[in-house]
Image: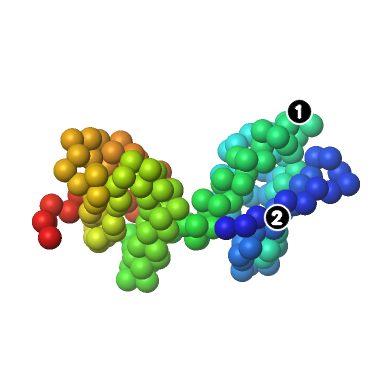
């Protein structure tokens, strides 16, 4: 994913231009906690701290920082939040998933696995494959050096499960597929 960063004449404002659609609902400005509830992306960026306001359009995110915040510290954190949001897609509803919402949840799970989890697992010579999502339980298969590793369950529970649950409210548990192929 490519995100172009553009400085503005105002030293407290920077525009971020991702190479994919940010919003399909026009434009919106977020300046307080009440307005943030309408945008999971704005909420995540505000949680970084040092943010005064956020303006989101279909193809741009304009961030205004507070006077005391430093862009060199904020930019990598903001980029990470934008990439996480766009790789997962729209945040699924916390309401029990219907068929269409279940499909969206599965897309969010696989996107998060591919964007954040698989690269880390691959660095250790392993891999992780999505198998199923049913009633809040994500089933995955540990592969490569992770299959049979004594630390695989710890990675699964302390790493994979924790990440999936923090980003996707529908996820209640992550299990390793026990079937041997």
Q: Secondary structure at mark 1?
A: loop
Position of 13 with respect to 167 (left or right) is right
Whether 133 is drawn above or below 44: the answer is below
Position of 159 with respect to 75 (left or right) is left
Q: Which residue is mark 1?
A: 68
Label 1 vs 2, first from the N-terminus: 2
How far across and down, in percent of the image, does residue 78 sit?
62, 44
Taking the spot 70% from the left edge, 55% from the top edge, the residue there is 4
Taking the spot 20% from the left edge, 47% from the top edge, the residue there is 147
How far across and down, in percent of the image, does residue 116 sit?
43, 48
Residue 139 appears anywhere in the view: yes
How far across and down, in percent of the image, does residue 25 sit?
63, 67
Position of 109 with respect to 139 (left or right) is right
In the rendered picture of this protein, how many numbered marks are placed on residues?
2
Front position among marks 1 and 2:
2
User: Between residues 25 and 131, which one lies in front from this camera angle?
Assistant: 131
Way the structure is coloured? rainbow
């Amino acid at each position: 994913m490519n995100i172009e960063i553009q400085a503005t004449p105002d030293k407290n404002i920077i525009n971020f231009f991702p190479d994919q659609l940010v919003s399909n609902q026009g434009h919106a400005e977020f300046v307080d906690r009440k307005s943030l509830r309408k945008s999971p992306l704005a909420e995540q960026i505000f949680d970084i701290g040092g943010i005064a306001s956020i303006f989101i359009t279909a193809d741009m995110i304009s961030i205004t920082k507070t006077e005391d915040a430093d862009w060199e510290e904020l930019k990598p954190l903001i980029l990470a939040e934008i990439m996480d949001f766009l790789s997962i897609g729209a945040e699924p509803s916390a309401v029990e998933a219907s068929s269409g919402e279940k499909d969206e949840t599965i897309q969010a799970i696989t996107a998060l696995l591919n964007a954040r989890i698989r690269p880390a697992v691959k660095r250790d010579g392993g891999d992780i494959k999505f198998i199923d999502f049913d009633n809040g339980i994500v089933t995955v298969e540990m592969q490569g050096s992770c299959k049979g590793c004594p630390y695989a369950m710890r990675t699964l529970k302390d790493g994979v499960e924790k990440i999936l649950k923090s980003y996707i409210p529908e996820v209640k548990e992550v299990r390793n597929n026990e079937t041997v192929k």
